[in-house]
Amino acid sequence: MRTTAVVIGAGQSGLATSHCLAALGIDHVVIERGEVGHSWRTGRWESLRLLTPNWLTRLPGLAYDGDDPDGYMDMAGVVAFLERYAGLVSPALWTRTNVESVTALADGYQVITDRGTIACSAVVIASGGFDIARIPAFAPSLPVDVESLTPFDYTSPSSLPPGGVLVVGASASGVQIADEVQRSGRPVTLAVGEHVRMPRLYRGRDIFWWFDRTGLHDERWDEIEDVARARRVPSPQLVGSVPRSTLDLNALTARGVRLVGRLAGIADGRAQFSGSLANKCALADLKQGRLLDTFDEWATCHGLDGVVEAPERPDPTRLPESPDLVLDFAREGIRSVIWTTGFEADHSWLHLPVFDRKGRLRHDGGVVAPGLYRIGLTFLRRRKSSFIHGAGDDACDLTRHLAAHVGATTDFWQNAGLRSAAAG
């Protein structure tokens, strides 16, 4: 089979890309390993909700129009929204189809699937950025009677063995899971490394209202000094809940969660923690203050000081006087560890010379190579790239680039200086 473009993935990014390709009159096929919104259907714990409010849920041609704009969608709601969008976009869609490899042809790419082979001029990878849970190399050193889980394995507190729980990582997933497990009556210890502290509401408005109105989430990858660093920033400590409450370390310790520093290693049945907890928290407090200062300045400049509530500042993070540096799993009754230590994309089927020496995909705002694109990663082209409402702008940008590319007739691998490597 031959088509102009292949889109790999039918989540928000893949469907938005399909919408934009159709608007440009570019024939294409969308390939999905499961059903539409596969990653939202699987590998998510039961209580998970979006971090963004419903009113911000939008894609090209469709926006949230329900009766709870200030609420936060659960996973069933997200899937329903994406299914509705797929019906609107109506792409040539291959569901339950696994991509086995993507390789180079003289005039484009070959996409081999378990359903057949497609030759095309361009490929857009929209398969998500959270396929693989990252866990430390020392994780296998856990005692054999301690269960090891990632957010893909965790479903609810009732799925855990009896006893205490160590949650490793204090970004969005970590604080949400720690809170839920502590509320269930199980004692939780939270290992805290670098994190982003953020209030759910600020001056009476959702924190994402401020990001949206100020344009901060529209900041582009080519406008900042260190985009590599920006792409590694952890997800903020937020939860989508009613009431709209802040879930920071102070909220967790008020509920009885014990804080320790970054998990540095495991040996002889004991966990060893860094002594940097106070420094990590002080830095997060400082950065939160700077962010809120930015919002205050914007509000003053735009005459909103009398419209929104008065400025306020959250209390500094409260810490134990002497955080534990060592934890004995048996003595403390810790029976499970949940690794909320980040995720990465799976590109194992991409057989092209487009990776750096550490195996990371190289790209410039989503442009990987001539005719090869990536969408849906953190800060791909904008700060909002990894959120549902960020998919549309990125898709429009990349499909315009793709349209210009497929209009050319040159051997793009040769022009890019990659022909010999691609052929090999």
Image (cartoon, helix red, strand yellow):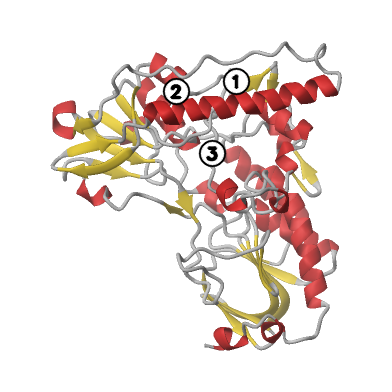
Q: Which residue is mark 2?
A: 249
Please indicate whether residue 415 sits to the left or right of residue 339 in the image. Answer: right
Amino acid bearing label 1:
Arg
Where 253 falls versus 62 (above or below)?
above
Q: Is label 2 or label 1 in front? A: 2
Amino acid bearing label 3:
Ser
**Helix, strand or loop at mark 1:** loop
Amino acid bearing label 2:
Leu
Please indicate whether residue 393 sits to the left or right of residue 207 in the image. Answer: right
The image shows residue 85 at horizontal and vertical percentages of 72, 49
Q: Which residue is mark 3?
A: 235
Within 10 Å of disc 2 (Cα), the crowding (few <14, some 14-19, many 20+) is: many
Please indicate whether residue 180 sits to the left or right of residue 363 in the image. Answer: left
Q: Which residue is mark 1?
A: 244
The image shows residue 141 at horizontal and vertical percentages of 20, 48
Foreground: 116 or 397? Answer: 397
Image quadrant where one finds the N terminus: bottom right
**Helix, strand or loop at mark 3:** loop
* C-alpha distance separating marks 2 and 3: 14 Å
Task: Name the residue at 86% across, 18% down.
Answer: 303
Question: Residue 71: in sight, yes or no?
Answer: no
Foreground: 121 or 363? Answer: 363
Q: Which mark is residue 299?
A: none
